Amino acid sequence: MTPIRALIVDDEELARQLLREYLEESGGVDVVAECANGFEAVKSIGDLKPDVVFLDVQMPKLDGFEVLELIDTPAAVIFVTAYDQYAMRAFEASAVDYLLKPFSADRLQKALEKVRARLGNPRPPIAAAELSAAARPPEQKLERVVVKDGTKVHIIPIDRLDYVEAQDDYIALRSEKKNYLKQQTISSIERQLDPKKFVRIHRSYIANLERIARIEPYTRDSRVAVLSDGTQLPVSRAGHAKLKSLLGETV
Amino acid sequence: MHPILAKRSWFASYLGVWGFFALMLSALLRIPASLTWREALLIAAPLCFFYAFCCLTPWYMCRQIQLPRRTWIGVILNHFGAAMIATSLWVELARLIAYLLGAGARLRPGIPDLAVVAVLLYSLSVALHYVLFALEQSRRAQIQAREAELRALKAQINPHFLFNSLNSITALVGSDPARAREMCIRLSDFLRNTLGLGEKESISWREELALARTYLDVEQVRYGSRLRVEMNVDDSCADCLIPPLVLQPLIENAVKHGIATLVDGGIIKVESRVKDGLLEVSVENGFDPDSPAPRRHGLGLRNVRGRLETRFGPEARLTAKAVKNQFRAEMIVPCRRNA
């Protein structure tokens, strides 16, 4: 049996050491790398393509969820954290397991069995960004969006995001006159954004309310939203109803 | 039920007081009404016994008519009405007894005095009841304030700190048992000290600082070389008295929202000194300005600010600001020492 190739991501050295020790004892697992922060993790996961990633949530630079968003190959992910509030949603999104610190070697064994089952019988992969979106507590809205561009990672604070446009399986994020492409569906990012600040004005568009300068009629029964930089975005009937309820009858 | 009726010993002492009133009243009645001592006592004793119960009734009324909630007119009218009823009952009772004793006519000149005494006694009872309620209320407010403080303190013992520390210990047990043992002891020290603090109103700056040191010792094991601490503490402030756990949240923030956000870690600088009778404390740390703005940060600071305000009023100040990648919290409180 080929060993499982595992990658450990945790900013605490002792936590990494413990996981490595447990994994070495259990046998059949090869720890291919250890990463101490989110940036390293994104790079190593891309380079080494491990079978399973043990992922801490709270880390410097990029947190565990953001790391998930930035990796292309959806490896099996096991969250390892002292916080229990993300667990439910992580499972719903089919994270393989969720280990609460401190955990026992037996508990880790069970997680590894799940990984083996998953590897022997691969399910259709879920885009990592979807997993990450689902793993966040629903009440916690995004404060920044992370996008990978080749080897570079862009961090876009939410208040600098003008609008989001759906493009097939991707979304284009518009911020400070630049477009950033990301593999995620528009519905999934809509759920992550604060509905008081971002409105789905159209099947393919989400606009930052603060950027909307005015709404103008376009054809007889369609409208466009004009942003403060002059960009025009189509507004659907449902979108117009939402804008009316948020901004008042005047729009 | 009235608290005096609830306890037999209280009720007995209460009746004892009224027995004394009965003697005074006999003395008062004897002269204008030209009664014998025996007659005066026979009238005054049952009167006072009856009135002892009458004067308990304001408890129910005072409870209904809480002072600040109603207009003064309403309060006065209500109690005046009740006083009139009590007084007329008392006067009629006195007349009945005098009549039975064959002293009805001789009592008549004493009746105005009797009425005045009745009104005064009843009013006194109303006033005492209000005092009783006010005392009770302030006691309850004190308990509530105390409970709020305890809740705040409990919330500050962060369970994640505990879990992460236990995880570090689990790791050390295999690789370095001696350090694992040491960590257990530091963690125990910290927990024991924090738990004991809830009962204290004030602790010395020395104790608060020692607690912060124990906390940082524990976190040191977790963060290793990423966490560096510089303490610059003037000896003159060691005896200043402060509410417990006001420095602790500042230190926790510095670790959680500062050091933990930095790949290579950073320095936490703690400085304190006394200047012009004021204890000046500052906690400074590096942080990653790109990390998402922490929400709990504000909560911890607000909590400390509120507690300082309750204790010291406007004399205390807590400010926090971030300049570039440095975060600095400053606390100034009057330095009070034990006499």
Image (spheres, rainbow, N blue to C red):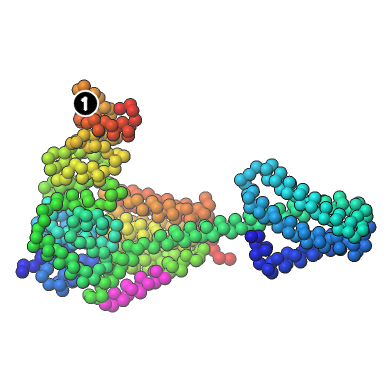
Asked if the magenta segment contains residue B179, the reply would be: yes
Q: Is residue A46 above or below residue B219?
A: above
Q: Is residue A221 visible?
A: yes
Residue nearest the viewer, comparing B76 with B194: B76
At which x and y percent is residue B253? 35, 57
Q: Which residue is mark 1?
A: A222
Q: Residue at position x 21%, y 45% from top?
A: A188
**Where is the C terminus of chain B found, in terms of image quarters?**
bottom right
Magenta stretch holds residue B40: no
Looking at the image, which is closer to me, B83 or B93?
B93
Residue B173 is left or right of residue B114, and the answer is left
The quarter in which the N terminus of chain B is drawn is bottom right
Give the magenta part as a residue range.
B177-192
Q: Quadrant of residue B336?
A: bottom right
Q: Residue at x 25, y 25 (%)?
A: A216
Identify the secondary structure beneath mark 1: strand
Question: Left or right: A86 with respect to B236?
Answer: left
Q: Residue at x 18, y 68 (%)?
A: A110
Residue at far bottom of view: B178
